[in-house]
Amino acid sequence: MRGASQGQRRKGWGRGGASMTESPAVALNAAAEAIRVQNVRRSFRSGQRTVEALAGVTACATRSRITGLVGPDGAGKTTLMRLIAGLLLADSGRIEVLGVDVAREPLAVQARLGYMPQRFGLYEDLTVRENLDLYADLQNLAPGGRAARYAELMRMTGLEPFLSRMAGRLSGGMKQKLGLACTLVNPPALLLLDEPTVGVDPVSRRELWQIIEHLVRDQQTTVLFSTAYLDEAERCAHVLLMHEGRLLGSGPPQDFMAEMSGRSFFASAPIDRRALQEILAGTAGVIDTVIQGGRVRLVTAASPDPRAIAARVPGLTLTPVPPRFEDSFVARLRTPGTSGEARPAPGATGTATAGASRTGRPRGAVISLQHVTRRFGAFTAVDDVSFEVARGEVFGLLGANGAGKSTTFRMLCGLLPPSAGALRVAGFDLRTAAAIARRRIGYMAQRFSLYGDLTVLQNLTFFASVYGLSGPAQARRIEWAMTEFVLGPLLAAKASDLPLGFKQRLALACALMHEPEILFLDEPTSGVDPLARREFWRRIGALAVSGGTVLVTTHFMEEAEYCDRLLIMSEGRVLTEGTPDAIKAAARRAEFPDPTLEDAFIAAIGTRGAAAA
Amino acid sequence: MSFSSRRLFGLMRKESLQIGRDPSALAIAFVLPAVLLFVFGFGVSLDARHVPVALVVQAPDAVTASFTGRLNRSTYFEPTTYRSIQRARRALAARKVQAIIWLRSDFTPRAESSGNAPIGVFVDGVDANTARIIEGYLRQVWANWLVAAARRGGKPAPMAVAEEPRVRFNAEVRSRNYLVPGLIAVIMTLTGALLTALVIAREWERGTMEALMVTPVTVAEILLAKLTPYFLLGMGGMLVSVALAVFLFAVPLHGSILVLTGCSALFMLASLGMGLLISSAARTQFAAGQIAIIATFLPAFILSGFVFDIGSMPAIIQLMTHLIAARYFVSILQSVFLAGDIRAVILPNAAALALMAALFLALARARARKRLD
Amino acid sequence: MWRRVLALIRKELLAVLADPRSRAVLIGPPLLQLIVFGYAASFDLNHAPIAIYNQDRSLASRDLVARFSLSPTFTVRRVLSSGRRIDALIDSGEVRAVVVIDSRFTRDLYRHVPAPVQVIVDGRNSNTGLLIEGYAGEILTDFSRAWSAAHGGDPPPAVLDVRALYNQTLDSHWFIIPGIVALLTQVVTLLVVGLSVAREREIGTFDQLLVTPLRQIDILLGKGLPGLIIGMGEATVIIAATVLWFHVPLRGSLAALYLALLLFVLAVTGIGLAISALSATQQQALLGAFLFMVPSIILSGFATPIANMPRWVQELTRINPMRYILVVVRAVFLEGADLASLAAQLWPMALIGLASLAVAGWLFRKRVA
């Protein structure tokens, strides 16, 4: 492999941004862009509507760099990827890939391209090795060169021990790595990765990034990397920021963040963080507030006046923090005063159950697990897990893929009986009184799981009736959902036609129809745009303030930050438990003065030596 | 991009591995045909034997006995004697018997004097086909009885015309002999069209097709790699079916295996072409299954002449049957099994099959693009 | 509790009717099958092509040929002048039978010796072959009697006086079309019920249902009853089509028919629910429904009589609900049967319904919990 020596020369590349002339290899290529997209439009028909997936996009990707295609779901990332790969034709505009017009000569492009679609097409009934063989054959790789190449790929991905395992039996992270290995069997000049990190736990996510960065460094591969996780943009050399079919911005991530310098702060005050967030959100000049552990992270308008903000809350301290990529995304979409951020806190009224808030939040355990174990055949998915969740708490269940958090979650919702141990939800033993306990819980699945063929109103009515609401009580709650979630104008729309953000609102409205004491959320905001995510979590916060209990399972650290307490699971066991700040504090090292939650998570998992999962 | 045998064999190997590991493919390829073959082989028969009939003889004597004796000896009938016509009709209404044969009290006197004594026959007309077959059988019994009676009485032949029926092919007139070969066409439709459409739809659903499409593989290679293993699977299913037909159901095979295999290959290609065509329109297994059943399986069942005679259908529907590949194959199968390698049947039908195979495959090739839209 | 089940039923009906795919399942195949079966599925013989080789060429033999060419059953496709091509014509399938009139035909007629007429039938489709033989025999018998009567011969001592009850013209459409009522009711009910749970499993709404206070029995009812409603609705449409479009007489008690259909749909619903509980994907449900449907139709007496099957297969058909409903439908349509005479068909269906629903309930509890 030719990588080693070039890797030496390219070692200056990194987050700090590489100057283009640093390496001769790059200088040669710098003149030509690997991808040139010119004013491309593409629309799709969906039912009676025409959806414009790309509304005139012009963009470029430089050779031998990672270009990030960043934006929330529905931004048009996948469509652009498919157009570049020659799988779709543009309605208008022109795409040149590696100097070739894709529309005219797709095969010539595809011969030099590696493409990993969102759900990579692994043949789940073939083994790891057979999948590799197939792609080696398809790439016309001579059998002689395979052994060395496979060894290289396996070393890179750590899949060596699993060569003869069926691909279907790999964990989510390993599947993504195998998918990547398959596209890399014949080293491509251009690598297109469509959301490779979706549904992948932070450990595997980090490993995937290492593989990709290594590839760019060693083999000068050009990478186009699409992602809905805005934090990943910071690792790219160049970012194409997309939103609703348009290019919102283009440039090195540092440029995006530079616009925001001096505008981001951590705020802390001796009051409840949720109350603090509410106050700050309503303050003029503040365009964004996000809860991060015990503090509130805020972003100000272009000309910040920290003192004016500090004056709003007695005892408020503002600590400047470096800007994040997400800040600039939010700033671009939201101008102060015109956004929903200034709205009063949604949802506090009527979401929680009787008396909880009035009686001063009794701190009893609403969910309790004692020595719960769940086995599937010989495999123990959950092994002797115990924890408690108090009323009014937002509790996060974290873990790598296959750590057992989904199984725990399903047991809590009453979807799976435990093999051993006791589970009490809202005071009921789920094994004996499941139906009664279920009346007290609301559930929102990760995937949109309402009836897509029914209208918004029909969905609301159905869930209200199923939870036993009828007559005026039902009408009152539907009225509530309509105003609270601003669903009024969409009542007659089919649920499947709603934009993602609205689907999510509807799902939450349905889950809260019967004013449950406990709300179960499964990765509720992954892929949702940052504004919708903020809105969602403010509702959840309000719910908790008024005494509701929320249990979230996720491996999306952004969501974990909103939680009061976290539990990290690994290989079916509890690894650690505590507030986000405590967990971060535990991971603090000399070389890591201010670890993120992701760092902390990886450190926690790492100490267990569970990298294989 | 030019053709590459490595890519092709790689795909074929993958396809074969998957067939070997996928229980649902094996189910459609082997379990379903076996179930169909058994159910049909044992369950479907249009041959009425031992039909229960009621016999009402109001004045038994030697003449009536000579007639009823013939009924009793016939393998077609299982007569039960009833004392009155009312009871017999009740038995008919209760579906205990399928016909009543009624010799009234004046039967013998009339037969011996004026002749034309009526033999009253009531058949249950609900199942019209069986009723007609019963009628035919009775006519034979009656005609034989007349001849024997005349001969015994030394009288001239009672009938001016003597019918000499001769059945060419399938001399024992067993319906299984034509139903079981016809079934092979239905089974091959299942493996050819349904299975192929389903496996391609599955690749779309699981996203593997998208991953394949961006490799340098050509459309022709993808199609060829799908065709070959399923072609072999279908031919294997055909051979198993033929063996079952011959050895389990004792259907004679008069023609040559070679002709049978050749024609089956043509039909299999047409079937696969249909399957590929369906898969180019349907991207979900659900839709592919629906279309395959409606567009290939049902017609192969009903409009191919496999159970229902095409000649008796209304003209418009007869015209429609020409669009159905199974129609030509059923003709070939019935001839090859029961009659032999008859050129006059095989050549035109095989030509039609070849044409359809070429058409479907060409259409499938034309419609398949390396695009998602 | 009923309010919840009602909400579930309402949602189920809305979902089935709003989803174009399931609407297609409900409307497409039934319509197609009604048309195809209604027109194409028939055992009647019409215009069967035959050839005649008349070696006699007398007045009498021409009279006989005329009887063949005037019969609506046959179409005389060829008149042969030599016997050489007889086999070839049959082999190629151009004609289904050849009638050969011997050169001694007239001579034998006058000598009161049975005049030989050979009917060579293509036996490849043995059912058609038998029917052709029967019709040809009928024509020859009629000719015989007419000739004897005209030429002073003795009439035969006895003649057959055949009357078909319930279906005087022996139109096999009258046999097949009422059967379609049962067939399509089964297909639609099975698909609606069988696919409903699998569909919800695939789109993820089933978990959402399971976390509601609905109990398993509620879900079972909520999934089963829409199938029942849709099945009965489908049956009504097809009964109407049978009477109004195909003009099959409806002679018996409609109430008895509906009671029987209700029991039948109940049994099928139970089977559908069992398939539903067992399958994780719509694909599996479809395959399961298919694997149940094909044998149940073949072994029901829908197209071919149960009486023709081997003994052990006949015993096997007793667990097939379609066997019973077919008898009921045909009895009510053609025989004018009433409730009392159908009791023997009703209780087995009720029993099968109970058993299948119990099994479905058990599977539900086992698979879902």
Image (cartoon, rainbow, N blue to C red):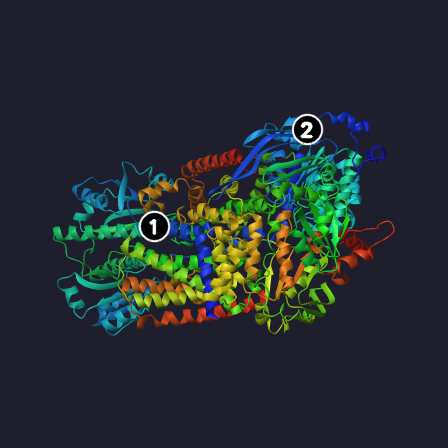
Report the front residue among A155 and C47: A155
The percent position of residue A234, horizontal first and vertical second, equals 74, 41
- Residue at position x 38%, y 42% in the image: B321
Residue topped by disc 2: A98
Chain label for disc 2: A
Taking the view exactly as shown, the residue that stands out farthest to the right is A590
Q: Is residue C63 left or right of residue B366?
A: left
Judged from the image, the secondary structure of the residue bearing numbered disc 2 is loop
Secondary structure beneath label 1: helix
Front position in the image: B257 or A96: A96
Q: Which residue is mark 1?
A: C128
Position of residue A332 measured from the top left corner of the image (x, y, whole percent): 64, 40
Foreground of the two, A172 or A365: A365
Residue C223 showing in the rendered view: no
Please say whether residue B288 is visible from this viewpoint.
Answer: yes
Amino acid identity at mark 2: Leu
Q: Please, is residue B282 above or below residue A95 in the view?
A: below
Neighbour class for label 2 at 10 Å: few (<14), some, many (≥20)?
A: many
Residue at the spot x=44%, y=64% of the render? C225
